Image (tube, rainbow, N blue to C red):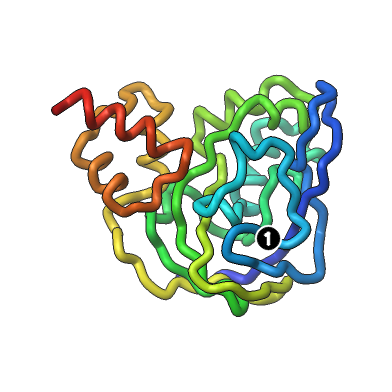
């Protein structure tokens, strides 16, 4: 299957979390997302040093991932509501293991390209008011993923995310995340070179991959 119904669309407003730090991680339902080249309209970013950028315009999460979290933390399952993980679009299916860096999709009237897996921080723990969440998310690689915008457009609930092209079928999102955070970090040099040469690495991943590649020269 390469066509997925959009179940939810979300934007965030800056608010204070349980640690009193400002963040827009908790997002709220919208009737339409207006997807621009560099950002989604009305989707705010509190810390632009570490968040945002042209390679991270649209964040995607799935009910499959939410259900994973609910199973891991049944006593707080009611906290894992759509939008709470910081995503802009929600589908029922898809996980990081099923997707590849560079996959190109139509999204409503927009065209987007998958770039990198999210690199989450402790903000997730504060958003859910539970200091166990980040560790489990990182270990499982259930972080969600980002897209850059190739063509601007709009998307509504009920529209579809549809695969158009897959220029790099051997570059799974889950493997890049494992290379960054798994036991053998930045060890698959051939894989890292291919990721780097896609030109899709963001300001978080790119310098780390460059450093790994420099060390082997």
What is the number of callouts on the image?
A: 1
Q: Position of residue 181 (x, y in %)?
A: 43, 27
Could you say where residue 215 lies in the image, as x and y percent from the top left?
Answer: 21, 23
Residue 98 is left or right of residue 11, and the answer is: left
Image quarter hosting the C terminus? top left
Residue 20 at x, y = what percent?
A: 84, 24
The residue most toward the left is: 217
Kindly identify the residue that appears in the image at 51 percent across and 59 percent down. 148
| Residue closer to the observer: 104 or 162 | 104
Q: Secondary structure at mark 1?
A: loop
Disc 1: which residue: 40
Which is nearer the eye, 19 or 204? 204
x then y, percent, for residue 85:
69, 43
Asked whether the viewer can see residue 113, the reply is yes
In the rendered structure, the answer to whether residue 189 lies left or right of residue 195 reads left
Give the residue at the far bottom of this rendering: 109
Q: Going 74% across and 54% down the picture, which residue do you hit?
A: 43
**Horizontal placement of 38 versus 88: left or right?**
left
Does residue 60 show up? Answer: no
Q: Quadrant of residue 45?
A: top right
Q: Is residue 35 left or right of residue 199?
A: right
Would you place residue 141 above or below residue 40 in this image? above
State which quadrant residue 40 falls in. Answer: bottom right
In front here: 174 or 68?
174
Are there few (<14), some (14-19), or many (20+) residues within 10 Å of tag 1? many
Q: Residue at x 67, y 74 (%)?
A: 154
């Amino acid at each position: 299957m390469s066509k997925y119904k959009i179940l939810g669309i979300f934007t965030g407003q800056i608010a204070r979390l349980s640690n009193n730090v400002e963040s827009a991680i908790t997002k709220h339902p919208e009737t339409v997302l207006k997807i621009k080249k560099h950002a989604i309209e009305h989707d705010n970013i509190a810390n632009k040093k570490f968040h945002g950028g042209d390679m991270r315009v649209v964040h995607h999460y799935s009910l499959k991932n939410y259900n994973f979290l609910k199973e891991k933390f049944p006593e707080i399952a009611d906290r894992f509501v759509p939008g709470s993980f910081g995503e802009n679009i929600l589908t029922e299916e898809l996980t990081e293991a099923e997707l590849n860096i560079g996959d190109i999709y139509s999204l409503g009237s927009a065209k987007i390209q998958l770039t990198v897996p999210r690199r989450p921080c402790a903000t997730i723990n504060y958003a859910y008011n539970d200091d166990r969440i980040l560790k489990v998310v990182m270990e499982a690689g259930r972080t969600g993923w980002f897209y850059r915008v190739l063509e601007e457009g709009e998307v509504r609930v009920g529209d579809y995310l549809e695969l158009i092209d897959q220029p790099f079928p051997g570059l799974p999102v889950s493997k890049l995340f494992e290379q960054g955070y798994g036991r053998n970090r930045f060890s698959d040099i051939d894989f890292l070179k291919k990721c780097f040469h896609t030109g899709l690495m963001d300001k978080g991943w790119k310098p780390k991959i460059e450093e790994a590649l420099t060390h082997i020269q």
